Every structure is written in structure tokens, then in C-alpha cells.
Image (tube, helix red, strand yellow):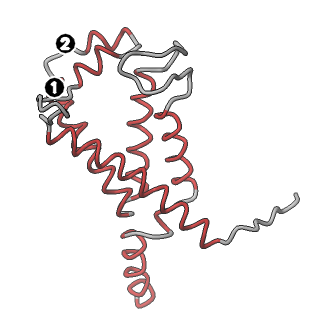
Amino acid sequence: MMEIKSKTSPQLQSASLILLRTLIGWHFLYEGYYKLILPAWSRDGHPLARWSAAGFLRAASVSLLHRLADATWTPWIDRVVEVALVAIGLSLMLGFFTRIGGWGALIFLTLVYVASIPLQGTPQSGAEGVYLLVNKNLIEWAAVLVVMTFRSGEIAGIDVLLQRRREPQAKVA
């Protein structure tokens, strides 16, 4: 099998992966933070409605999820989603338990995408852009997969610092 040599420096590749991981982490962190601090205010000075799992489930394109919107445990789901988004964001930004944070991001993005697969291909009210099958959630899912495949947690972050700290102890034993 022929080996392909890259002309891109390994340092640039590593920096690019860390940048991508950090940006994805920021996106998750801010989404969770924003959901935690609501009610927020519009530019007009009016309070914005609080995010809820019930509202998301009612708007889902999968009709089975509409029934779940009326369940009594949706407030619990609201809190879990908020905390999970913050935890995933911090994990990816800091490079701390990066594999777990990456898996959390993949699972979350999969659930969000499957709940609302863009099938219309026409402009939708309240949506940014026009999508047919591929939307921002699917693209971010692929980006998280790249970050995990290249094990960016082993390049930079708290995981690397902890690993370096464990290595001298392993050599002594």
C-alpha cells in the first residue's frame, strides 16, 4: 500500500484540531449557559421565553416525540440538557475527559438531528438557512467525529497534563 506524505506540518495539524475542539466546546458551553440563565431579554427589552424540552419535542419532525412533550418529566430533561451541554463544552474546551465529552457531544447531536431531520428543503420560519438532509447539527457531528478520531485529547489539554504526571509514577513502580 502506498504511503501518502503530508506537506502540512504536524504542529499546524495539531493546532487546527485543538482549535476545532475548542470552538465546538465553546458552542456547547454557551448553549448550555444560555439555557441556564434564561429568562433573557430581546433587543426590544422584552423577556424571552425559557427553553424547554417540551417545546423542542413539540417542534420535532418525528411524530412519536410529540407525545413525549406532555410527559411529567420534561422539566427534569430540561435540567439534564442544560448541565450536559455545559459539561460537554467544558470537557472539550479544557481537554479534560475529552473522549467522554466527545461521546457526549456525538450522542447529543445525534438525538437532536434525528428528532428534526431537515426533509423540506425550503425556508422554514424561525430557521436560519435552508437545509435538505444536511444541517449545522450534522456538520458539527462530523467535526466532533474528526476531533475524536485524531484523539485531540492526547495533543493538548488537562488530559495531557494528567498523563504526564502519571508517567513518572509508572516508571518508579
According to the picture, the residue beneath numbered tag 2 turns out to be: 70
Instruction: Quadrant for residue 93, please give it.
Output: bottom left
| Residue shown at the point (14%, 35%) measured from the top left | 41
What amino acid is labelled 2 in the image? Asp
Decide: few, some or many residues near mark 2? Use Cα within 10 Å; few <14, some 14-19, many ≥20: some
Q: Left or right: where does residue 2 sit relative to residue 7?
A: right
Q: Which of 45 and 35 lies nearest the eye of the viewer? A: 45
Q: Left or right: where does residue 20 sit relative to residue 82?
A: right
Instruction: Quadrant for residue 115, please give it.
Output: top left
- Where in the figure is residue 107, as x and y percent of width and height? 41, 37
- Where in the figure is residue 24, as x and y percent of width and height? 42, 50
Instruction: Quadrant for residue 91, please give it.
Output: bottom left
From the image, which quarter does the C terminus lie in?
Answer: bottom left
Residue 36 drawn above or below residue 154:
above
Which secondary structure, mark 2?
loop
Residue 168 drawn above or below residue 144:
below
What amino acid is labelled 1 in the image? Ala
Q: Earlier in the sequence, mark 2 or mark 1?
A: 1
| Residue shown at the point (40%, 23%) measured from the top left | 127
| Residue shown at the point (25%, 36%) measured from the top left | 81
Q: Left or right: where does residue 35 sit relative to residue 14?
A: left
Decide: few, some or many residues near mark 1? Use Cα within 10 Å; few <14, some 14-19, many ≥20: few
Which secondary structure, mark 1?
loop
According to the picture, the residue beneath numbered tag 1 turns out to be: 49
